Image (cartoon, rainbow, N blue to C red):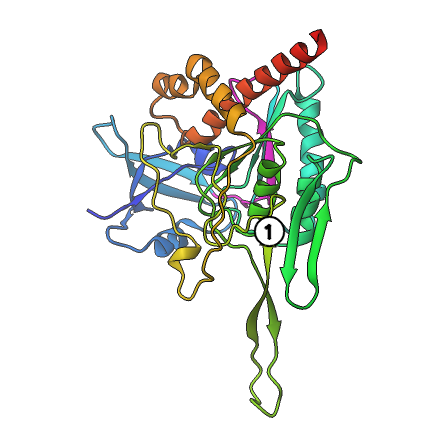
């Protein structure tokens, strides 16, 4: 039987408030079967005028009978930047970015300030920056986001045959000292990879998740000469490559996290879809790379094995209403140990 499965209802929105849960299998919409129906048609049936109800019939694990859930439709606005204090972890902040658009850095700063106000101690103890599924966007925004965390060093270099090398350095002004973990996956591309590699290469924070997409090339649109073709179309030309602060290009190879974590507890790493799966992709420029976080990662890994709680939280509630974000909660475990390690190193330095 082919029905639509709920991956996870959005926290605070109508479906979650009505009681829909992750893993629910939708079989009927307003009494009509959706068996074998494409997802977009199911979504079209569920959508409707704001304030009007829609009834979903669902099958739920552990429930012998079908459930009928009435949802009152409302406008759902997906924000480009969202955040919250991470549950089970005092004063650890979480900021999610979907794209690098003109307002991204302003919204990230505003979200950071909002989270600080929500802390019990008056400041964030640590921050998880989530770039999973972020396909990129504006170069200047990626530089500005990385610059929030970096006091020194380079962020990215752009190299081409005409203008040579253009480097974007970090600045000391308005820099956040908060301990940092960046979440990435195969959907993190381009501008996301610039931020991730800048954080990793400069030893500013830890990367958690899966290898990134591997898009480190720059394209421009050129319109052919009118006498060649009267039609209005453009040719997309690759003119440059991005290079990380260490001088490596992440084209095809992507950015490898310091800690690989699958999406599911006890699950396998997904195959993913990356640059190498595209036709006519630019061949990688191979280079040996060892993360400057290597020794730190070893210490953090040992700490997390002893004190991590991500698996315990899942065991205590294996079927939550909102899908359990194992990668995020594991990132929070690593962040706690990163904070502990930094405190130990600071105390050691002070005693010397």
| Left or right of residue 239, residue 331 in this image | left
Q: In the displayed image of the protein, which residue is found farthest to the right?
A: 173
The number of numbered discs placed on residues in the rendered structure image is 1
In the rendered image, the vertical position of residue 228 relative to residue 121, given as above or below = below
Q: Compared with residue 63, is residue 54 higher up or lower down, i.e. above or below?
A: below
Frontmost residue, 90 versus 344? 344
- Return the residue at label 1: 243
Q: Which residues are magenta?
A: 73-90
Q: Is residue 253 visible?
A: yes
Magenta stretch: dominant secondary structure: loop
State whether residue 45 is above or below residue 70. below
The quadrant of the rendering that contains the C terminus is: top right
Magenta region includes residue 5? no
The residue that appears at 44% across and 62% down in the rendered structure is: 281
Residue 329 point in image, percent of width and height:
47, 25
Q: Position of residue 264 (x, y in %)?
A: 36, 32
- Give SS at disc 1: strand
**Measured from the top left, where is residue 92 in percent x and y?**
59, 22
* Residue reaching furthest to the top: 351
Q: Quadrant of residue 25?
A: top left
Q: Is residue 77 visible?
A: no
77 inside magenta stretch = yes
Which residue sits at x=34%, y=18%? 315
Between 37 and 230, the residue placed more toward the observer is 230
Residue that protrudes farthest toward the bottom in the picture? 227
Q: Residues within 10 Å of mark 1 (few under 14, many from 20)?
A: many
Query: Residue, x 62% and y 41% (percent of image)?
Result: 198
> Could you tell me residue 214's position as x and y percent?
48, 51
Q: Is residue 223 left or right of residue 87?
A: right
């Amino acid at each position: 039987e082919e029905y639509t499965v709920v991956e996870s209802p959005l926290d605070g929105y109508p479906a979650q408030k009505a009681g829909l849960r992750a893993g629910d299998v939708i079989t009927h919409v307003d009494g009509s079967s959706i068996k074998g129906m494409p997802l977009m048609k199911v979504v079209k049936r569920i959508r409707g005028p704001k304030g009007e109800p829609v009834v979903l019939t669902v099958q739920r694990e552990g429930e012998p009978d079908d459930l009928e859930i009435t949802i009152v439709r409302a406008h759902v606005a997906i924000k480009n930047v969202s955040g919250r204090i991470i549950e089970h972890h005092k004063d650890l902040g979480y900021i999610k970015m979907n794209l690098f658009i003109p307002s991204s850095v302003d919204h990230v700063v505003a979200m950071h300030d909002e989270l600080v106000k929500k802390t019990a101690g008056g400041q964030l103890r640590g921050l998880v920056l989530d770039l999973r599924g972020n396909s990129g966007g504006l170069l200047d925004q990626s530089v500005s986001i990385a610059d929030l965390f970096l006091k020194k060093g380079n962020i990215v270099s752009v190299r081409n045959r005409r203008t040579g090398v253009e480097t974007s350095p970090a600045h000391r002004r308005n820099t956040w000292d908060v301990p940092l973990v960046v979440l990435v996956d195969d959907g993190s591309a381009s501008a996301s990879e610039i931020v991730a590699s800048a954080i990793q290469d400069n030893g500013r924070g830890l990367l958690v998740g899966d290898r990134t997409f591997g898009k480190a090339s720059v394209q421009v649109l050129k319109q052919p000469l009118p006498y060649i073709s009267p039609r209005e179309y453009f040719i997309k030309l690759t003119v440059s490559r991005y290079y990380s602060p260490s001088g490596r290009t992440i084209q095809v190879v992507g950015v490898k996290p310091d800690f690989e974590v699958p999406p599911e507890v006890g699950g396998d790493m997904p195959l993913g879809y990356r640059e190498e799966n595209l036709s006519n992709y630019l061949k990688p420029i191979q280079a040996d790379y060892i993360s400057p976080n290597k020794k730190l990662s070893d210490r953090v890994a040992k700490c997390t094995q002893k004190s991590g709680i991500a698996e315990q939280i899942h065991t205590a509630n294996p079927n939550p209403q909102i899908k359990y974000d194992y990668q995020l909660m594991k990132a929070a475990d690593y962040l706690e140990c990163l904070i502990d390690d930094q405190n130990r190193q600071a105390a050691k330095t002070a005693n010397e």
